[in-house]
Amino acid sequence: CALPISWDMPISRRLSFSEFANHVGTHSPEHVQALLAQMTPRAHLAILLQEAACCGDVRAIEAVVAHLGPCRACHEALTLAAEEGHLAAVRALIPSGHPSGNHSEALVSAAIKGHVDIVAALIPVSQPKADDSAALRMATQLGNTDVVELLLPVSDPTANHSEAFLTAIREEWW
């Protein structure tokens, strides 16, 4: 689990994700927050958050989110965690990740990958009807039947050009 990192920070203030995860696991929350406070700009913290989401490291996610607060980076991290299938990370990011924003990207990502447990966790906080029921449309096209069954009751059967429902009807999921 590695995202490309290219930082302009001086080497003494640069921190790899593995070093950060080690700090989170071995130091007090106060020490971790002091370390995060030294890191500028916020983009560097966003990279750590994305790496933590990609790896499903809930302790690292919680540490960075405590420092950043709700932000666009949290939403991107939520989408990554949903795509990678890390339920605990998704749950940790829901309060700050704005799961209903940007056409419910996290829900769509989880539906595409067939992560039933994550779709179930995101439905109540997302907008399943967003973008002409995109999550349902993608799940039906990819044959993720368990996800389709979860999304059918909360999606929009009257949406314009509802490919999702036409596909679901053709496949006898409705």
Image: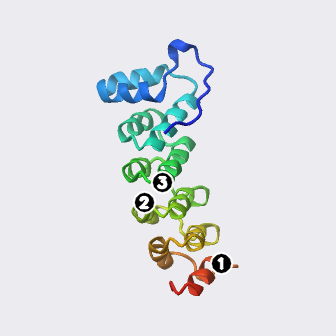
Disc on res. 163? 1
Identity, as a three-letter code, of the amino acid under mark 3: Ala
Q: How far apart are the alpha carbons under marks 2 and 3?
A: 6 Å
Tell me the residue at 41%/65% (across/down). 120
Disc on res. 174? none
Identity, as a three-letter code, of the amino acid under mark 2: Ile
Q: Which residue is mark 3?
A: 82
Disc 1 residue crowd, few under 14, some 14–19, many 20+, Cα 10 Å:
some
Identity, as a three-letter code, of the amino acid under mark 1: Glu
Q: How far apart are the alpha carbons under marks 1 and 3?
A: 23 Å
For residue 130, side relative to residue 97 (left or right):
right
Q: Which residue is mark 2?
A: 118
Mark 2 vs 3, N-terminal side: 3
Are discs 2 and 3 less than 8 Å apart at CB?
yes
Mark 1 vs 2, N-terminal side: 2
Disc 3 residue crowd, few under 14, some 14–19, many 20+, Cα 10 Å:
many
Tell me the residue at 49%/22% (across/down). 15
